[in-house]
Amino acid sequence: MIPSPALAPTGPSTAAGARERDRVRASGALVFRRSGTIHTLSYDYEGQLTQITQGQNTTDFVYDALGRRYSRTAGGTTTVFFYAGN
């Protein structure tokens, strides 16, 4: 992810909760604030969620060649997903 100091407002949030205006970094990451914590959602070039950052906590996602979620890593613990059939 390329860091970008500039944030562009995308308009008022329509989701429930104490969310302020959503912002999108030049890198394509969505940034919003909920309950005083800044959340950053990062996506790859295919639009798949690759990382969620909530304050000091980070969750990473990896996908297989078919676009299915392969693993999730949060708090030092990795969960690998297996698919039966298609």
Image (cartoon, helix red, strand yellow):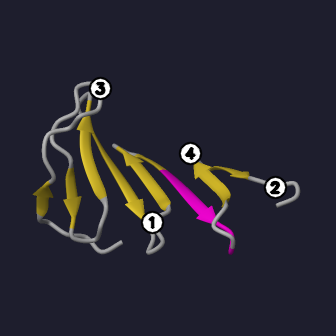
| Dot 4 crowding, Cα within 10 Å, few <14, some 14–19, many 20+ | few
Mark with earlier residue (2, 1)? 1
In-front residue for pair 56/68 = 68
Residue 51 horizontal side relative to residue 3, left or right: right
- Mark 4, residue position: 75
Q: Earlier in the sequence, mark 3 or mark 2?
A: 3
Which label sits in the foreground, 3 or 4? 3
User: Could you say whether the residue bearing mark 3 is in a helix, strand or loop?
Assistant: loop
Can you name the residue that lies furthest to the top here?
A: 17
Cα distance in 3D space between marks 3 and 2: 33 Å
The residue at 61%/64% (across/down) is 62
The answer for how far apart the CA atoms under marks 3 and 4 are is: 27 Å
Q: Which residue position is annotated with label 1?
A: 47
Q: Which residue is mark 3?
A: 16
Kind of residue sitting beneath label 3 = Ala
Where disc 1 sits, the SS reads loop
Helix, strand or loop at mark 4: loop
Q: So how many labels did they put on this image?
A: 4
Q: Which residues are magenta?
A: 59-65
Q: Which residue carries the number 2 mark?
A: 83
